[in-house]
């Protein structure tokens, strides 16, 4: 049979790892894994990015999920962070000049908490000592002296005025509201009736004198007020003088302690001045007013809030540079927030309610973020770019950022930022950001590209085995024996879709190890064996392949028309891949072609009804180019051909069925039947070369399952592009059938080779005279096309 020379030997599709090459009994004896497996390119980029401290050299880790990006980033960055110096502590304090603009103080790590304790102790000390000094005998004596002098001076002024008023015929009396002047006669005050009975001249004299008295009284009041003001100032000066003797020593001690930090020393000076100017807060006694005592107490406590220190960022326990992995990068979680307190329906805030974000905590170190999570919060992404541009971070009210409820709030002093940001995301996300956001390329100049596969060589297999051992130790699982470990290595190749490669999607590999260990534990086995790995793989498949089983059941019943026996003209089995996200499988589909005289060319029924995608339509149009180039050099191509995927009710995309479609057309033109036991996959170009396609393993296993459901004959198989042979990583059941000769893999490079396999007739070479070898497929196709061209020409002439 001519197809035999294109059959792939079973040895070429076998991929099993030989465990006898290894000298360990279980993975427990393997050394610990060091570094990242199979990601040299990404590791070098990440290492370089970590060494460059210039602005803009932040890092984007690009790769599919499960390739170890996050784990490796934490491990490597954690090591690098330990070599960095500890960042400074940051504190927010009250701004005594602008209360709405809290001040940021920077201190060495650990000194921020020390400042908090020192200030708290200072205020507690003053709350005790200041009331004592104001209750002391010395203060009371000096205060009494000043009050007595004021009272004496006041009395002298009043007595002097009384004498002057009496000379003018009036008496000066004190009342609760001030002073009152009353006219007198013969030493007695006049009543209103008596005053009215006085002679006119007398009344006029008294009225004029009263004006003089009022002027002198006004002058007295001005002098008394001035004297009272002077007395208050003297008493206030006395209070401040006495208080300063108490406040100055501890504050001076703190200023000396923090003398190396001018901003702290300046803050202490301002705080000392504020305490001196607000002594009433400290002089308050323990007695509370009867009305709303709790409200009074709350107000008094708030009066001392301004003297507190908000330890905003505490690096006292940090080892080296901080590493912050923010899993929920909202605006507030990244850049901090301003909290509010609610009392009696009123909302208020102060600097003690400022809360740090991840950027504050990572300042001086590293901030790791998932790019997709960050971009879901648009304000957070814009805010991060602003921080990287300006080199400083401001705590801003989130509501004001949204612009929904603008309000008057705090505007804290910004803090300078020096950190390296590591974004983790997919390659697609990286390219979208690079193309659509001009700022992105300025801020993230290092790309660490994580691959999903690596070469299957001895070194990488040893690394795989070390990963298995390390994973078991980390998760406290029973270790794998050699045969089980070999199965996991083979699974790595299946994940990669290439026998020459191993997958670096270690989350999937770890999932298999976990489930294998679970089956071993359920059976009471202290070691994970090969049977446990195979059981885990079977159970994984069983959990996800319900739809595949339904389709295979319908094929077995004949509800889905798929022939795997006999031969038919213009009909071939193609194979499509159904990808459910968590599982993919191959489904055989009947492809039929009908050819007839016409000039429409190849008609794609799926395209006509808008069920075919652009790539599939492109593949069909390529067929017209191939047919015209091969058979229409000496005659017009008077061909119409319709192609259809039978019983396909969903959309179709991709060009992997284009070779199958071409075989169906050639079979129809040559009137030669195609072996229905051989399914076909592979794309074709205009030269007739067969090109590799994806999902080859799933396609072979899908058609094998259909043949198994309808009965194996020993002649069935799949025709694939030769370049896809290394991509076959087949299940044991399929491999055993191939070894026994019950199922076959055929590999070809050209349409002529494929048509020989399917029809069993040589394709036929072109002879020097332009014709093809007689009784070959190409000969019959060429003759048929010539006949069709002649009939079309005769028909056209007859009409004319």
Image (tube, helix red, strand yellow):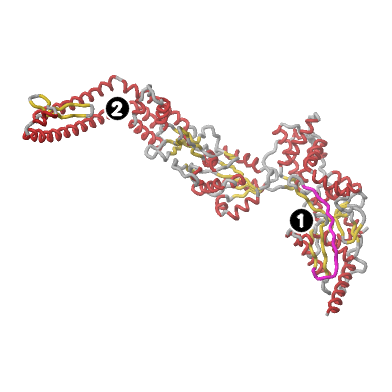
Seen in the image, is 492 located left or right of residue 351? Answer: right
Could you say which is closer to the camera, residue 414 or residue 180?
Answer: 180
In which quadrant is the N terminus drawn? bottom right
Q: Position of residue 679 (x, y in %)?
A: 86, 54
Q: Residue at x 39, y 34 (%)?
A: 259
Look at mark 1 in the image and give the residue it sits on: 652
Residue position marked by numbered label 2 in the rendering = 239
Magenta region: 584-600
- Seen at 32% across and 28% down, the residue is 244
Instruction: Say whether residue 776 is magenta.
Output: no
Residue 408 locus on image (x, y percent):
44, 42
| Residue 374 in view here | yes
Q: Percent position (x, y) of residue 143?
A: 26, 24
Q: CA distance from mark 1 to mark 2?
A: 91 Å
Q: Do the numbered discs 1 and 2 sit on residues whose CB atoms are within 8 Å? A: no
State whether residue 78 is above or below residue 687. Answer: above
Left or right of 24? Residue 96 is: left
Q: Nearer the viewer, residue 230 or 95?
A: 230
Q: Nearer the viewer, mark 1 or mark 2?
A: 1
């Amino acid at each position: 049979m001519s197809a035999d020379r294109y059959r792939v030997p079973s040895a070429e599709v076998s991929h099993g790892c030989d465990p006898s090459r290894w000298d360990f009994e279980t993975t427990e004896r393997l050394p610990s894994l060091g570094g990242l497996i199979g990601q040299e390119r990404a590791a070098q980029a990440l290492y370089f990015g970590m060494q460059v401290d210039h602005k803009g050299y932040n890092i984007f880790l690009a790769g599919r999920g499960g390739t170890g990006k996050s784990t490796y980033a934490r491990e490597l960055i954690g090591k690098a962070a330990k070599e960095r110096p500890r960042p400074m502590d940051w504190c927010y304090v009250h701004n005594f000049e602008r209360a709405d603009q809290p001040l940021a103080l920077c201190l060495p790590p650990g000194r921020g908490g020390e400042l908090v304790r020192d200030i708290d102790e200072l205020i507690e000390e003053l709350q005790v000592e200041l009331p004592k000094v104001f209750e002391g005998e010395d203060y009371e004596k000096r205060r009494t002296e000043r009050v007595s002098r004021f009272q004496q001076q006041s009395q002298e002024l009043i007595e002097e005025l009384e004498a002057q008023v009496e000379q003018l015929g009036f008496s000066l009396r004190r009342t609760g509201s001030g002073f009152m002047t009353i006219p007198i006669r013969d030493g007695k005050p006049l009543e209103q009736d008596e005053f009215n009975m006085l002679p006119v001249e007398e009344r006029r004299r008294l009225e004029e004198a009263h004006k003089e008295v009022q002027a002198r009284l006004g002058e007295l009041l001005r002098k008394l007020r001035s004297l009272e003001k002077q007395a208050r100032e003297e008493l206030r000066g006395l209070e401040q003088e006495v208080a300063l003797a108490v406040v100055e020593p501890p504050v001076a001690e703190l200023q000396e302690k923090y003398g190396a930090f001018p901003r702290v020393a300046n803050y202490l000076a301002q705080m000392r001045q504020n305490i001196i100017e607000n002594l009433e807060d400290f002089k308050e006694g323990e007695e509370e007013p009867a009305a709303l005592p709790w409200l009074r107490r709350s107000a008094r406590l708030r009066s001392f809030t301004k003297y507190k220190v908000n330890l905003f960022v505490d690096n006292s326990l940090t080892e080296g540079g901080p590493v912050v992995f923010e899993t929920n990068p909202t605006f507030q979680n990244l850049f901090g927030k301003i909290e509010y307190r609610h009392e009696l329906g009123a909302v208020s805030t102060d600097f003690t309610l400022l809360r740090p974000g991840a950027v504050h905590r990572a300042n001086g170190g590293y901030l790791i973020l998932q790019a997709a999570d960050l971009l879901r919060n648009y304000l957070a992404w814009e805010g991060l770019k602003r921080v990287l541009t300006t080199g400083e971070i401001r705590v801003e009210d989130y509501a004001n950022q949204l612009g929904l409820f603008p309000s008057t709030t705090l505007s804290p002093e910004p803090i300078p930022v020096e950190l390296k940001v590591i974004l983790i995301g997919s390659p697609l996300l990286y390219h979208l950001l690079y193309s659509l956001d001009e700022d992105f390329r300025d801020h993230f100049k290092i790309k660490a590209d994580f691959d999903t596969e690596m070469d299957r060589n001895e070194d990488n297999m040893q690394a795989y085995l070390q990963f298995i051992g390390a994973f078991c130790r980390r998760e406290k699982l029973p270790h794998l024996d050699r045969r089980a470990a070999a199965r996991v290595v083979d699974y790595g190749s299946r994940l990669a879709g290439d026998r020459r490669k191993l997958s670096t999607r270690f989350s999937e590999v770890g999932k298999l190890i976990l489930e294998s260990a679970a089956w071993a534990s359920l059976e009471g086995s202290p070691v994970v064996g090969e049977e446990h790995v195979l059981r885990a793989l079977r159970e994984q498949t069983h959990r996800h392949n319900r739809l595949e089983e339904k389709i295979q059941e319908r094929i077995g019943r004949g509800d889905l028309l798929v022939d795997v026996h006999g031969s038919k003209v213009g009909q071939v089995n193609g194979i499509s891949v159904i990808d459910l996200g968590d599982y993919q499988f191959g489904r055989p589909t009947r492809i039929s072609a009908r050819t007839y005289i016409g000039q429409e060319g190849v008609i794609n029924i799926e395209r006509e009804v808008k069920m075919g995608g652009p790539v599939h339509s492109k593949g069909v149009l390529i067929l017209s180019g191939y047919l015209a180039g091969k058979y229409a050099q000496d005659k017009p191509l008077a061909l119409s051909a319709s192609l259809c995927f039978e019983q396909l009710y969903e959309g179709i995309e991709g060009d992997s069925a284009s070779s199958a479609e071409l075989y169906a057309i050639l079979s129809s033109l040559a009137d030669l039947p195609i072996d229905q036991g051989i399914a076909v996959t592979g794309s074709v170009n205009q030269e007739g070369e067969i090109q590799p396609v994806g999902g080859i393993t799933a396609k072979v296993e899908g058609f094998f399952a259909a043949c198994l459901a309808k009965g194996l004959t020993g002649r069935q198989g799949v025709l694939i592009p030769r370049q896809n042979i290394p991509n076959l990583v087949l299940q044991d059941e399929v491999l055993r059938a191939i070894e026994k000769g019950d199922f076959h893999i055929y590999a070809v490079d050209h349409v002529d080779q494929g048509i020989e396999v399917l029809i069993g007739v040589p394709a036929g070479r072109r002879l020097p005279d332009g014709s093809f070898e007689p009784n070959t497929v190409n000969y019959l196709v060429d003759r048929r096309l010539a006949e069709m061209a002649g009939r079309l020409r005769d028909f056209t002439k007859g009409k004319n």
